[in-house]
Image (cartoon, grey):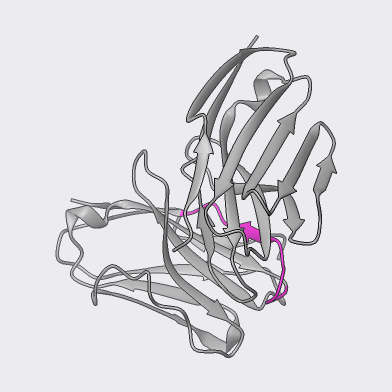
Amino acid sequence: KQEVTQIPAALSVPEGENLVLNCSFTDSAIYNLQWFRQDPGKGLTSLLLIQSSQREQTSGRLNASLDKSSGRSTLYIAASQPGDSATYLCAVKETSGSRLTFGEGTQLTVNP
Amino acid sequence: GAGVSQSPSNKVTEKGKDVELRCDPISGHTALYWYRQSLGQGLEFLIYFQGNSAPDKSGLPSDRFSAERTGGSVSTLTIQRTQQEDSAVYLCASSDRVWDGEAFFGQGTRLTVV
């Protein structure tokens, strides 16, 4: 059974810092991995999707990397801003046509 | 539509009543997911529809829960004889391709059973 773990569970940083969020998964035979953010009381917003054949994806200040062999993904946020404060979730899709398995998330607070 | 739409956004119901939650996926999306998020908890998988294939119902917590997807589009999640532990946010997502599509979520339905 696939298990997804996110470390740390919570992170507080001052504005302007670069930071890394970690996601690990137990079964490396994944199809794709997706990073989301969730604001309090809201649904999930997709940030980045990495296919199993890719090593990284970038969108603005966000960069996500994938190392299937070690079962790890990282989300790098450059020059953090208070508006980045949210819970960040990673999810893996094990095979084509299967469910997404989520981690518990990292709650990020960026202080002005 | 512009995104995944869920209705109602909030629902308060009495214990023992049945409720129906609706999800309108992004037009043309072939895959549809339902998840549940209890207060302060992670996302719990409920059910997954993939085109015309038999749905993956392995996450439904009991036989009080059922879901259907009509015409490959709109989906309804039904909870019969609701209990207080059913109180949660129910989230729906869809993706544009069965094999490797990016999943997009709706804003959720907050269900409160009193």
Q: Main secondary structure of the magenta part?
A: loop
Could you say where residue A77 lies in the image, as x and y percent from the top left?
A: 74, 29
Residue at the spot x=37%, y=69% of the render? B59
Quarter in which the N terminus of chain B is drawn = bottom right
Residue at the spot x=48%, y=83% of the render? B55
Could you say where residue A70 lies in the image, as x and y percent from the top left?
A: 64, 48
**Which of the 4 image quarters holds residue B3?**
bottom right
Position of A108 compared to B98: left or right?
left
Residue B63 among those drawn in magenta: no
**Which of the 4 image quarters holds residue B90?**
bottom left
Q: In the image shown, does A96 or B39 lie closer to the viewer?
A: A96
Position of B22 compared to B30: left or right?
left
Residue at the spot x=72%, y=77% of the render? B28
Could you say where residue A66 lies in the image, as x and y percent from the top left?
A: 73, 48
Q: In the image shown, does A55 or B100 lie closer to the viewer?
A: A55
Seen from this angle, which residue lies furthest left?
Answer: B16
Reply above or below: A72 against A8.
Answer: below
Position of A59 compared to B76: left or right?
right
**Which of the 4 image quarters holds residue A31?**
bottom right
Reply above or below: B102 against A46.
Answer: below
The part of the chain drawn in magenta is B97-108
Residue B104 among those drawn in magenta: yes
Reply above or below: A31 against A83.
Answer: below
Could you say where residue B32 lies in the image, as x and y percent from the top left?
A: 57, 72
Q: In the image shown, does A82 or A5 lie closer to the viewer?
A: A5
